[in-house]
Image (tube, helix red, strand yellow):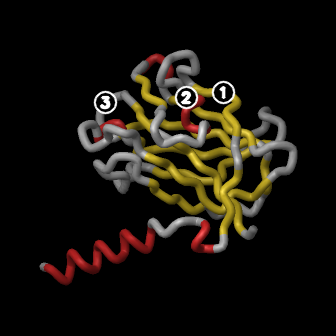
Amino acid sequence: MKQTIRTTLTAFMLATISAAAMGQTAVKATFVSGSDAKTRESADKVADGRKSTKWCMDDPRQLPYTVVLSVGEQPIALQEYVFTTGDDTNMYPDRNPCSWVVYGSNDQKQWKVVAEEHSNLRMGPLNEQDYYFPTKSQTPFKFYKFVFQEVQEGTRIQLSEIQLIKAGK
């Protein structure tokens, strides 16, 4: 039993090694649009660079919830993206997203699927914890749209940050 726990813990630690340690570069993304962008815990908080703020909303009429981020004029191929849980996720782990699709675009009109997760329960009840999700896309885009279809339970979503990581320096 202890060996199984050690093995699982080691696998978890390896899966959450920082992008910088793996020779990758975080990209400064800016918020473009998103669901519920006009409240104190609005969608723009996912790109403000602070784990102390968060996006939290519950409006089933707006499902699926969306966030669009821009990487600027120079498109990048997305190596992976990082979701950071909120500051009270230990009390509300059911707010973590579990099904989503990531799209890329250069004009915000034509979108191509970059990554998708369905029924992913890997995000746990840890406050301000980073979770890394690799992509298989090689195509560079200026815009990335996250479409959150489902949370772990109910309809309230919560995320502190979304980071975009490109390969190389």
Tell me the residue at 47%/33% (across/down): 54
Q: Position of residue 157 (x, y in %)?
A: 41, 32
Q: Quadrant of residue 143?
A: top right
Q: Give the mark, 1 or 2, whose residue is nearer the N terminus.
A: 1
SS under mark 3 = loop
Q: Is residue 18 above or below residue 67?
A: below
Q: Give the mark, 1 or 3, whose residue is nearer the N terminus.
A: 1
| Residue tagged 3 | 154
| Residue tagged 2 | 43
Tell me the residue at 58%/65% (across/down): 19
- In the image, 72 versus 80, the foreground residue is 72
Q: Position of residue 95 (x, y in %)?
A: 35, 36
Q: Quadrant of residue 139?
A: bottom right
Would you say the residues marked 1 and 2 are in contact, meaning their CB atoms lie under 8 Å apart?
yes
As measured in the structure, the alpha-carbon distance from the residue carrying label 3 to the one carrying label 2 is 18 Å
Q: Is residue 100 above or below residue 156?
A: below
Tell me the residue at 42%/35% (across/down): 158
Other residues around mark 3 within 10 Å, as few (<14) / some (14–19) / many (≥20): few
Q: Quadrant of the N terminus?
A: bottom left
Q: Is residue 54 above or below residue 119?
A: above
Left or right of 95? Residue 101 is: right
Q: Position of residue 92 (x, y in %)?
A: 27, 37
Q: Quadrant of the C terminus?
A: bottom right
Query: Which amino acid, mark 2?
Result: Ala
SS under mark 1 = strand
Q: Residue furthest left?
A: 1
Nearer to us: label 1 or label 3: 1
| Residue tagged 1 | 33
Q: Give the mark, 3 or 2, whose residue is nearer the N terminus.
A: 2
Would you say the residues marked 3 and 2 are in contact, meaning their CB atoms lie under 8 Å apart?
no
